Each structure stands twice: as structure tokens, then as C-alpha cells.
């Protein structure tokens, strides 16, 4: 069977459709119309037989062309048959409508009928057909006029075009429904559509939960639809696995090949499906991430705490409530705090339990992660809390420094006080010298000493006292 023979059989149907104009059909008697209908159906049947023979030996490119030609011929066949069946049912339709209307309850108020729309996709035909027949077509309490109204309201896009020119009256319902059956009730086209979509599924490059779920759901959908049409899907395991495995991301497919290599027999589709489901569950579980845990080193000890936004929510500074006077402003605009002396500010800060380093109330100075230091002396406290040693006596300076340093989390001595509060902020150049120091065990260690002739205190690093 070649393409030329198949086209000639299809051309016969096209000729009949062109010949059956409205005037010609109206002049037919019932017998003539029935005879023309029989000839048309016989021609379409022979075309389908020739199509079946050709589709078996066709390649992919030829299959697409054959399907396109079949749809064209089927469309002409439907329109031609519609004209002839409409002529035959002109007299009987009125009687049928009358009988059905007498048996129906015209006062019945029907609830809204919720049926999914049908746009002409072969994949959706059987679900639509089953629902429409069970809810509307077989319901004897609904007359043909209402049936026609429901049918036209549900059909969309290309499906609606088939009966678009037909008036919404009961006389046209049977003809309209017959046209839909002739156009879409074709198991061969529906099976081919599902198979084609199985073969052209997207190849996923990366492993994501959305991608694996889409591949799995799409495959199951098409296999169920093909199985309903009495195809032996349960015997297609090797074919299905070959199709689906090539659509998996490279890493996922590698894991599957490693796992399936341990099977003593050829794996079945259920095995691959379960493998994909397990990967999907794992990806969904990985989406739940714990709170970030930070390590904070304080006073030589490592502490762990969970940083959350709840800390910021309780910060009085965020709400613009002053921790000194409880007014609605930040601490830097507080007259009580800003007009006080540094020593008084230090007392106010201690009383309000605010951090000496950043002036916040959410934590103490030993927990502060702010890296800023005093602009005057470089130590870890706020510049507003800096005490000038020239303006206070030695005793007051020692007590203030002791309180301040305890809040910062380090031990203080009198020598630290001298280092923390220098008598001058000017930069000077001092000389250094290398000295040999004898340790407790008699070992000599080389130190570098800083020579400050004006200093009254002597300092040594803590690690230098270990020798």
C-alpha cells in the first residue's frame, strides 16, 4: 500500500463532501439520503483499512503526515455525514422531542451541572464523554433543548467549532452529538496521541522535586489512559523503563543503573516508579532546613546560640522606646543621657542594663558581636561612655574602669588602668630593644622590649610570664 492509493481513497470522501451542498441534500428523498450515507460510510471504512495497513510500515516522519491526513479526511467525513443524518432525522426528531418533552418535568429546577469543558484534545475525550452521557445525555428529565444548551456551553476552542453554526434548539441536539462522536470517538487516534506524548516527554537536566513529580505523574496518566483502551500496558515494562530512564537527570539515571544492575532479572516498571518516588520523598525532606547555628567565642570559651529574629523583635530600640527615660525616641536623642557627663552616662547605662558597647538592651557587653570600639582609646566600649583620666581622680578611675571592664568580660588590674586610659592621645615614636630573659627552668628566651622613659608602670604579655 503506497501513499498514492491511500490519498485516492481519501479524495473520494473529499469529493462527496464538496458535492453535498445544502440545496442538493434538501432535494434528496429519505431513501436517497440513506443510500448516500451508506456509500459515504463504506468509503470511510475502506480508507481506515488502508490507513491501518500503511501506518504499520511508516517511519516517524510518515506517521505525522498520515495522522494529519486522517484528521482532514475525518473532518470532511463528519461534515458530510452530518448533512445526510440531519436530512434523515428531520421528521423523526420532532416526534422524539415531543415525546421526551411530555415525559419531562418542565417545572423541575435543575441544579448547576459542573462538567469540565472539552476543547478538542483527544486525551480528554473519554473522561468528558462518560460524564456528559451519565449526567446529561441519559437524563430523561432534561429535554433536548437543554441538552443542546449544555453541550454548546461545555465545548470550547476546536470542539466548539464543529457545532458552532447550529442553533441551540432541540431539533439539532442528536445531530450535534453524533458529529462529536464521529469526530472524537476514535480509539486508534487516542492511543497514538498518548503514546506520542510518552515518547516526547521533557528530558530533565537537573534533579528537582518538581521535575521528578511532573515526569512520574505524566507517565502514569498516559499509561492509565492507554490501559483503559484495552492495550497490554502490563507487558510493556522494558519499553516504559527505556522511555522514562532517558528522561531522568544524568545523576539520577546513573543511580538507577547501578541499582538495577543488581537485579537478577529484567526490572519491571514498578521498580523504577518506586525508585523515583523514593528520590522525590528525599528531595521533599531536604527542603526543611534547621535554624542557622553560630559559634561565638567569649572570654576564651566557645558558646553556641541560635540566631533568630525574635531577638530583634524584643529590642526596645527597634520600637524607638528609650531605655533611659522610657520616651518615644532612640537613646542617642535622649536629653537625659546625652547631656550627662561620661561617668553619669556609665551609671545610667549600668542601671538600664544596656550593652556598654552598642547601647542596646537585648544583651550584655560580654555577648555583644559589634566589632566597633571606642574612638578615643580603642577599647571595647562605646565612645559616649569613655572616661578621660585627666578629669577624674585615681580612685574614681579605678572603680569606674573595674565596673566597665567586668561588664566587658575581662579581669582588670591597676596596670590595665594605666593602659586603658592614656594621659595623651598624641602619637609618639618609641624605641625598642632585644633582651635575653632567663626563665624559671633556666632557659633563656629572647624578648623585644618597648622603652618608654616617661612610663611609671611596667607591662608584660600574659604569654611572656609562662617561661
Image (cartoon, grey):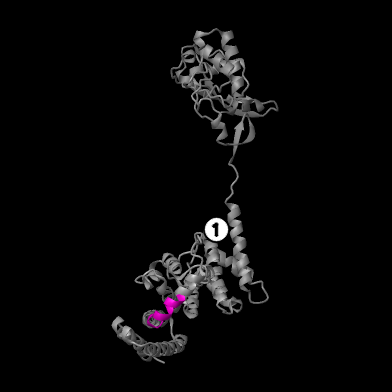
Residue at left 49%, top 67%? Answer: 142
Q: Which residue is mark 1?
A: 209
Neighbours of disc 1 within 10 Å: few (<14), some (14-19), many (20+) = some
Give the percent coordinates (x, y) of residue 208: 53, 58
Residue at left 49%, top 13%? Answer: 336
Residues 306 and 226: in front is 226
Count of marks overlaid on the render:
1
Give the percent coordinates (x, y) of residue 229: 55, 77
Residues 142 and 104: in front is 104
Give the percent coordinates (x, y) of residue 67: 41, 80
**Residue reaching furthest right?**
441
Magenta-drawn stretch, dominant element (helix, strand or loop): helix
Up/down of 55 relative to 377, above or below:
below
Residues 430 and 176: in front is 176
As for residue 312 lying within the magenta part, the answer is no
As for residue 87 lying within the magenta part, the answer is yes
Residue at left 63%, top 70%? Answer: 270
> In the displayed structure, does residue 73 sit left or right of residue 383?
left
Q: Quadrant of residue 261?
A: bottom right
- Residue 365 in sight: yes
> In the displayed structure, does residue 207 sit left or right of residue 175?
right
Up/down of 249 relative to 234, above or below:
above
Up/down of 188 relative to 353, above or below:
below
Q: Quadrant of residue 408?
A: top right
Q: Quadrant of the C terminus?
A: top right
Up/down of 13 relative to 432, above or below:
below
- Residue 460 in sight: no
Give the percent coordinates (x, y) of residue 127: 52, 70
SS type, badge 1: helix
Residue at left 56%, top 21%? Answer: 354
Q: Quadrant of the N terminus?
A: bottom left
> Range of the magenta residues?
86-96
Amino acid at each position: 500500500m503506497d501513499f498514492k492509493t491511500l490519498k485516492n481513497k481519501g479524495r473520494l470522501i473529499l469529493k462527496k463532501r464538496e458535492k453535498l451542498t445544502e440545496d442538493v441534500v434538501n432535494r434528496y428523498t429519505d431513501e436517497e439520503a440513506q443510500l448516500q450515507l451508506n456509500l459515504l460510510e463504506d468509503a470511510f471504512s475502506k480508507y481506515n483499512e488502508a490507513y491501518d495497513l500503511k501506518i504499520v510500515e511508516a517511519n516517524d516522519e510518515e506517521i505525522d503526515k498520515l495522522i494529519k491526513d486522517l484528521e482532514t479526511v475525518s473532518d470532511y467525513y463528519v461534515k458530510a455525514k452530518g448533512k445526510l443524518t440531519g436530512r434523515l432525522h428531520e421528521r423523526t426528531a420532532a416526534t422524539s422531542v415531543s415525546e421526551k418533552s411530555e415525559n419531562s418535568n418542565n417545572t423541575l429546577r435543575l441544579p448547576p451541572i459542573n462538567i469540565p469543558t472539552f476543547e478538542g484534545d483527544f486525551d480528554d475525550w473519554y473522561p468528558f464523554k462518560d460524564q456528559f452521557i451519565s449526567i446529561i445525555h441519559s437524563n430523561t428529565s432534561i429535554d433536548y433543548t437543554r441538552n443542546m444548551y449544555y453541550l454548546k456551553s461545555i465545548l470550547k476552542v476546536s470542539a466548539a467549532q464543529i457545532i458552532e453554526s447550529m442553533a441551540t434548539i432541540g431539533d439539532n441536539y442528536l445531530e450535534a452529538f453524533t458529529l462529536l462522536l464521529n469526530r472524537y470517538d476514535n480509539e486508534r487516534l487516542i492511543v497514538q496521541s498518548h503514546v506520542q506524548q510518552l515518547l516526547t516527554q521533557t528530558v530533565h537536566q537537573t534533579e528537582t522535586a518538581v521535575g521528578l513529580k511532573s515526569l512520574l505523574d505524566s507517565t502514569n496518566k498516559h499509561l492509565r489512559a492507554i490501559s483503559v483502551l484495552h492495550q497490554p500496558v502490563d507487558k510493556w515494562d522494558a519499553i516504559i523503563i527505556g522511555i522514562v530512564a532517558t528522561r531522568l537527570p544524568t545523576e539520577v539515571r546513573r543511580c538507577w543503573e547501578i541499582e538495577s544492575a543488581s537485579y537478577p532479572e529484567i526490572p519491571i516498571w514498578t521498580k523504577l516508579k518506586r525508585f523515583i518516588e523514593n528520590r522525590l520523598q528525599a528531595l521533599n525532606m531536604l527542603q526543611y532546613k534547621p535554624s542557622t547555628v553560630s559559634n561565638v567565642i567569649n572570654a576564651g570559651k566557645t558558646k553556641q546560640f541560635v540566631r533568630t529574629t525574635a531577638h530583634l523583635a524584643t529590642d526596645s530600640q527597634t520600637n524607638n522606646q528609650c531605655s533611659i527615660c522610657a520616651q518615644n525616641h532612640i537613646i542617642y536623642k535622649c536629653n537625659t543621657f546625652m547631656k550627662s557627663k561620661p561617668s553619669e552616662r556609665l551609671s545610667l547605662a549600668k542601671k538600664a542594663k544596656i550593652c556598654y558597647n552598642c547601647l542596646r538592651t537585648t544583651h550584655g557587653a560580654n555577648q555583644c558581636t559589634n566589632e566597633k570600639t571606642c574612638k578615643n582609646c580603642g577599647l571595647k566600649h562605646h565612645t559616649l561612655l569613655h572616661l578621660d583620666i585627666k578629669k577624674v581622680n585615681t580612685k574614681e578611675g579605678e572603680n569606674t574602669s573595674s565596673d566597665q571592664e567586668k561588664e566587658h568580660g575581662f579581669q582588670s588590674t591597676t596596670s590595665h588602668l594605666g593602659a586603658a586610659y592614656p594621659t595623651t592621645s598624641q602619637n609618639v615614636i618609641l624605641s625598642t630593644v632585644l633582651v635575653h630573659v632567663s626563665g624559671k627552668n633556666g632557659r633563656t628566651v629572647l624578648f623585644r622590649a618597648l622603652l618608654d622613659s616617661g612610663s611609671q608602670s611596667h607591662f608584660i604579655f600574659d604569654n611572656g610570664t609562662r617561661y
